[in-house]
Amino acid sequence: MRNDSATASDVLALTGGPANITQVTHCLTRLRLTLTDPAAVDEESLRALPGVLGVIGAGTPSLQVVLGPGVVDTVTAEVERQLAAAARAGGVRADAGAVDGGRGSKAPPRGGAVLRRVANVFVPLIPALIGCGVIAGINGLLVNAGWLPGLTPALAAIASGFMALIAVFVGYQSAKEFGGTPILGGAVAAVVVYPGVAKVTAFGVHLSPGQGGVLGALAAALLATRVEKWCRGRLPGALDVLLTPTVTVLVAGLATLYGLMYAAGAVATAIGTGANWLLTTTGAFAGLLLGGLFLPLVMLGLHQALIPIHTTLIEQQGYTVLLPLLAMAGAGQVGGALAVYVRLRHDTTLRTTIRSALPAGLLGVGEPLIYGVSLPLGRPFITACVGGSAGGAFVGFFAMLGEKVGATAIGPSGWALFPLLTGDQGPAPAIAIYAGGLLTAYATGFAATLAFGFPRPRRTTGARASSALKGS
């Protein structure tokens, strides 16, 4: 029987204890810990814990423990509870307030850590994006069918409300993640969506509410955080309470109106234009690359860095054309896992792992299959990427023909993406093309793994995989 409390206790013990943790977050499948001393992590023992599917970022301050969907929510809550208990007992430094969103406790990010920090801004927003996206899809079906006309305006309002104010949430999360006061980040980002900006002229033109979108909100909140930190280091306590928030909102707000919104709007437009050009001009090739390279990004934990791009496309066009292509990577993984299941029929342990991980894989959660099946075996991971490339090329080919497939929200993939699909010609063609891409990725991943995934036992595949290969 699963014991999330024990799992949380073991994770804390093997990552250096509560005093070594400065921040706790999670995404759909991973517990993300920011560490003071990365060398304190017992990586080998952590990987061996029951329920831990993988460990990413060992040896760095940003550690990710792959636990899988559902489990990660309860384990994260238990980790936070145990950290809070340790803090009350005096076992954690008083300045480790990053656990509960306090400011000033995070070191400046460097290199790839910046991408992870930006991803951390958007990951908490995914549940709302999923929920609102599904409601928008249901509402679209009702409108097209002419059903429940009295209810559809209410559903439209529910589905659109979050997206209309997403800039505020991005600003709040950005300041929280980068060490500022969250509400000040939200206050500055609110400028981006305030209707009154239409009266402001910048660079000779009137601004538009929402111009720059989430990118403008992110930039505004980051600037606000820098201004706030500068003020707090120079103002005495009595003046700090009054002047720091005032100067932060004023300086960052003016910079947002007279620079950041315009610049972010230009970048957002370029992203939309570039994505459309990429698919209509080189759709099959683009799909092949994106579908084939996404699994390595997931393995490295860098796939969340694409969330701002997806969100920008949804703001601009109503859907992201990239997510259906990237979702083919998970389908290739499913096909590869099925081939392993068929080929290694004598390895009951591995077949049990595949049976338990396959439902999540069909719904687009790839980590259980990555860390439990394909990556330990080596070559099946590569052949799964081949399946993803084939599915991506299939969907991209139809984009070249003018039949783009998009998702109205981010988060789910696999079969879970069907309710969120739409495109230039409506949801029906988009669903058909996406289904064809999934079948292509399943079949190619299966065939490629059977043909090339089992050459001979290799020392790097691990004892279990080697013995299974010998028996096959």
Image: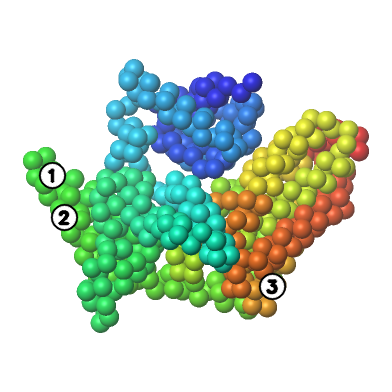
Mark 1 Cα-neighbour bin, 10 Å: few <14, some 14–19, many ≥20:
some
Q: Is the C terminus in the top left, top right, bottom left or bottom right quadrant?
A: top right
Residues at circles 3 and 1 in contact by the CB criterion of under 8 Å:
no
**Residue shown at the point (25%, 50%) measured from the top left:** 184
Name the spot of residue 69 as percent of width and height, x first: 59, 38
Camera-near label (3 vs 2) is 3
* Tag 3 and tag 2, C-beta contact below 8 Å: no
Asked if one can make out residue 290 in the rendered structure from this viewpoint, the answer is no
Position of 127 with respect to 393 (left or right) is left
The CA span between labels 3 and 1 is 58 Å
Q: Which residue is mark 3?
A: 398
**Circle 1 sits in a helix, a strand or a loop, which is it?**
helix
Residue type beneath disc 2: Val
Specify which label sits upstream in the sequence, 3 or 1.
Answer: 1
Q: Earlier in the sequence, mark 3 or mark 2?
A: 2
Which quadrant would residue 325 be assigned to in this image? bottom right
Q: On residue 132, which mark appears?
A: none
Residue 7, x across and y down, in percent: 55, 24
Which residue is found at the position 55% from the left and 57% from the top?
138
Residue at image position (23%, 61%) is 253
Q: Secondary structure at mark 2?
A: helix
Which residue is found at the position 64% from the left and 21% from the top? 1
Q: Nearer the viewer, residue 152 or 52?
A: 152
Counting from the top left corner in percent of width and height, residue 27 is at 51, 43
Residue identifier under label 1 = 240
- Residue 247 is marked as 2
Q: Observer-nearest residue: 413 or 172?
A: 413
